[in-house]
Amino acid sequence: MSQLKIYNTLAREKQVFVPMEAGKVGMYVCGMTVYDYCHVGHARMMMAFDVIYRWLMESGYEVKYVRNITDIEDKIIKRAGENGETMSSLVNRFTRYMDEDTEALGILPPNFVPRATEHVPGMLSIIDMLEAKGLAYRSDDGDVNFAVRDFDGYGKLSGKSLDDLRAGERVDVNTGKRDPLDFVLWKAAKESEPEEAKWDSKWGRGRPGWHIECSAMSCALLGEHFDIHGGGQDLQFPHHENEIAQSEGAFGGPMVNYWIHNGFVRVDNEKMSKSLGNFFTIRDVLKKYDAEVIRFFILRSHYRSPLNYSDVHIDDAKAALTRLYTALADIDLGSAPVAVDWDEEHAVRFREAMDDDFNTPLAVAELFDLASEVNRTKSVGTARQLKALAGVLGLLERAPQDFLQAGVGAGEGGLDETRIATLIAQRAAAKKARNFADADRIRTELTAAGIILEDKPDGTTNWRRA
């Protein structure tokens, strides 16, 4: 049996996964700052760790999965003020929207979803420890900052040295700091900010900095030292680097054994983000596409690779997912739960792929091999294996007809018979001209609309709705 290997950002290599406690895994993932709708980049992050969570459980581990909510932060204060509402009202509303989006995408809820505001005492305790060790100081403006140059090893996660980090780049420039690279642990209260954004402390009224929030929440729920910490690639520096500095500076030992970071979603070769204004919210995308199609689109790329977002790529994912469902459409799978036969050859290769740093593209390839076998043999056993393996990734969990009929009815109400006949004629002409790329594209378009083609020996083509 293969061993699970994880690409550890800290080590910059794949490593065999060895949990701190046999059979158990503690995993913390940085979640949303809830002041707006989640976009596809957020979906990619949550999907990546949903797959990791599922595979760890499928591998027999008891997983304690924590994904936090940031509910106190500059953007939240600003947006609530603009709306004329309380921060808690804003946060509760967008948390509900986030939960609706993730449920639609088949993302399992974590075991624990802590909110930053529930852990302020823990944050103050860590800051107190850092101050006692000379790693934190109060500046003239009332903020409490972390003294980066006094922590040995700063930069080990991101690979950045202090000499390479120039003041003013990706760090706050604050005249109250001893060094421009220092980061804030506790922000002194401002009169303009609402009372619900202020807590009492030995340093005066104020609120926590962003980085200290995750150190406190992960420690409270998983301990000072735990197995896996994850998040988007953009959090590697400075957020995760600063978490390491705070936690290891306070507790005097390693914080995390395996750091996992997912790749960006890109649009026109730029990272998708709110700041660039090139983002698509999950709920807007779900108005146009089936949720499982979006899930499948994301899973076809390795979690560490860039994911290129476009309608063309999603349409292609829809056509591919349709092929999988079509393979099951005429098979009676029965009503009993379907279990994976892990000794079967496709399942063995599926496991090897997933154990190789959660390689979903290779795992999905095994699903298509199985689908081809089902189409060829009409074997109920093979069809059940296909459905069971896909279920490990949260796919093919609906009745095939439910998906296929939804696919026909999507967009402008599906294709009428005139349009189908036209496309079939265009495909025949493309084949005759040996333009096989166009012929394949037309077949893909028809398949995505739930139209199944059957090429006859005499050169004609029959069709039927799936």
Image: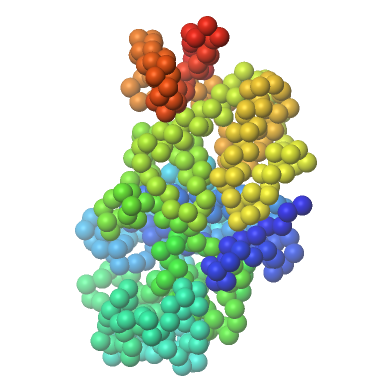
| Residue 32 drawn above or below residue 187 | above
Name the residue: 41% across, 38% down.
313
Name the residue: 30% across, 76% down.
169
**Most extreme residue toward the top, as rendered?**
458
Image coordinates for residue 304, horizontal then vertical, percent? 50, 56
Dividing the picture into quarters, in which one does residue 419 lie?
top left
The number of callouts visible is 0
Name the residue: 60% across, 24% down.
327
Name the residue: 42% across, 16% down.
432
Image coordinates for residue 445, horizontal then vertical, percent? 41, 25
333 and 166: which is toward the camera: 166
**Most extreme residue toward the front, as rendered?**
433
Q: In screen coordinates, is 454 left or right of 140?
A: right
Q: In screen coordinates, is 124 left or right of 332?
A: left
Q: In screen coordinates, is 233 left or right of 350?
A: left
Q: Identify the image's colour scheme: rainbow, by chain, secondary structure or one colour.
A: rainbow
| Residue 273 drawn above or below residue 234 | above
195 and 364: which is toward the camera: 364
Q: Using the rendered image of the protein, determine whether residue 407 is visible from the camera's viewpoint.
A: no
Image coordinates for residue 236, horizontal then vertical, percent? 45, 68
Image coordinates for residue 111, horizontal then vertical, percent? 58, 55
Dividing the picture into quarters, in which one does residue 209 lie?
bottom left
| Residue 142 drawn above or below residue 58 | below
Q: Using the rendered image of the protein, determine whether residue 343 is visible from the camera's viewpoint.
A: yes
